[in-house]
Amino acid sequence: MLKAKVDEILQDVNRLPAISSVVSKVLEKLNKPDVNISDLAQEISKDPAITASVIKISNSAYYRASKPIRTVQEALMTLGTKTVKEIVLLTAARGILSQDLNSYQLEAAQLWTSSLLVAELSSKIIQHKKLKIDKDLAFTSGLLCNVGKIVLAQFFAPVMMQLKTDLKDNQDPFPLLEKKYFGYTHMEISEKLLTRWNFPDELVDVVAHYLDPDQSKVNPLLTSVIHIASILIVVSGIGIDIGGESVPISPFALQQTGITDQDIETYFVHIPDLQAGLADLLNV
């Protein structure tokens, strides 16, 4: 049982994926209803990499800005605070998710593609079913739900080989096998990471329960949307890792969202279009 080792790593800040302190402060400011745009622009501008990324992504075809954006302040004025928050988190997530997960048999490019697609499909489901959830919240939740795999994959490649053998003779959902070998599922690790980064409770809850949405305590509807989107992306063959397609769609999630078999078919057929529409973001 590697739980003690995992605990040791979780205590060692230097061995964990890091997020810029600017991102944490920006999130904090954005969670306040009376956020001041100049303050926010100033905060974002403290991190040159995030500033450059916000300006670049704001001008991408994906966001369709009405005029060229030259500064963070212009991005905030033109696209709005919610969109800029989405872009800041996109930049932060890209930094964390840009590594190969060899032991999960997943390359960095695939991990990023699948994370973006889960984010985008979640947003589309919300629009299609007219659900009362912020599109940017769904996008961010979808983006981050696999972040825990990075910790497990980085340190435990040898165990993954045993796990692979176990998979052949085992019909259990993959998270149960993660728990058996590591003492944690990747969802539990994601939960710990997002808590450490001071992310809002709603996001922490989604990453903790996106594969068992009926356990969601904060926003079961949002968690159900991310659940369905993530499974559809895996079933479409994008970002499929060592765990394969071992988690079925939860009836609870279908009931929460009102998604029908026909809806699922429609979403599935449109995944290649979604991927084409994300071309700009796939290369950030």
Image (cartoon, rainbow, N blue to C red):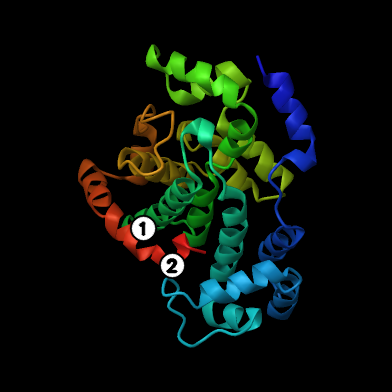
> Label 2 is placed on what type of residue?
Asp
Q: CA distance from mark 1 to mark 2?
A: 18 Å
Q: Nearer the viewer, residue 23 or 255?
A: 23
> Label 1 is placed on what type of residue?
Lys
Residue displayed at 73% across by 44% down = 196
Residue displayed at 32% across by 38% down = 235
Q: Nearer the viewer, mark 1 or mark 2?
A: 2
Within-10-Å neighbours for mark 2: few <14, some 14–19, many 20+: some
Residue displayed at 60% across by 59% down = 89
Left or right, residue 42 beside residue 263: right
- Considering only vertical position in the picture, is 107 above or below 48? above
- Considering only vertical position in the picture, is 273 above or below 197? below
- Considering only vertical position in the picture, is 163 above or below 73? above
Evaluate whether residue 81 shows in this view: no
- Residue 143 drawn at (x, y percent): 51, 51
- Residue 7 drawn at (x, y percent): 74, 26
The residue indicated by pointer 1 is: 124
Q: Point out the tag, 1 or 2, that comes first from the N-terminus.
A: 1
Q: Quadrant of residue 61?
A: bottom left
Within-10-Å neighbours for mark 1: few <14, some 14–19, many 20+: some
Residue lying furthest top: 169
Residue displayed at 47% across by 63% down = 283
- Residue 65 drawn at (x, y percent): 47, 81
Q: Nearer the viewer, residue 144 or 15?
A: 15
| Quadrant location of the N terminus in the rendered image | top right
- Residue 252 drawn at (x, y percent): 38, 34
The residue indicated by pointer 2 is: 280
Q: Secondary structure at mark 2?
A: helix
